[in-house]
Image (tube, grey):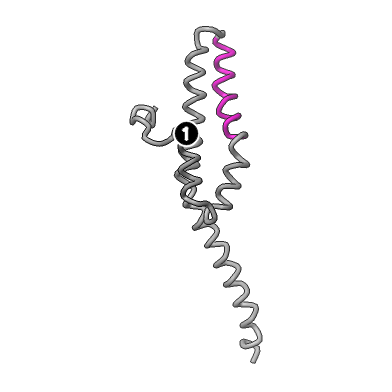
Amino acid sequence: DERRSAIPEALEIVDHEAHRFELWLNGLRSEPALKALRKAMEDACQFELELLKDEVDQETHEKLLVLLPRLVKRVLHKPTEDLRAQGGDLEPRFLKQLEALFQMEDRPESEDSA
């Protein structure tokens, strides 16, 4: 009888954990776009740093090498978390638009491995 009375609570726990798992699984759908977005931003920073290399002193350049990746991380943190949370609700069309916006499709191999 005690075990039967625990069934509703056990079912509630299972439902809760199943929902959490579903959210996590759905979030995986947006992961490639998120990684590509971060990579595109990091690549843009690296490109700009190379352009500035001869225009700033070594100390400033080294500070920028630390600052820019931090800035990318900070700027993308909230949108990344939001996209992961909505992963299952995002239409594939939206993810394609995101990729196109940041020109993440069909990038040459040399850019991806830089």
In percent of the image, x 62 and y 87: which residue is there? 3
In the rendered image, residue 85, in percent from the top left (x then y), is placed at 58, 52
Q: Residues within 10 Å of mark 1 (few under 14, many from 20)?
A: some
In the rendered image, residue 33, in percent from the top left (x then y), is placed at 47, 42
In the rendered image, residue 106, in percent from the top left (x then y), is placed at 36, 35
Residue that carries the numbered disc 1 in the rendered image? 39
Main SS of the magenta segment?
helix
In the rendered image, residue 31, in percent from the top left (x then y), is placed at 48, 47
* Chain part drawn in magenta: 58-74
Q: Is residue 27 above or below residue 42?
A: below
Q: Nearer the viewer, residue 35 or 17?
A: 35
In percent of the image, x 46 and y 50: which residue is there? 92
Q: Secondary structure at mark 1?
A: helix
The amino acid on which the numbered mark 1 sits, given as a three-letter code, is Lys
Question: Which quadrant holds the N terminus?
Answer: bottom right
Could you say which quadrant of the image residue 19 lies in? bottom right
Question: Which quadrant holds the C terminus?
Answer: top left
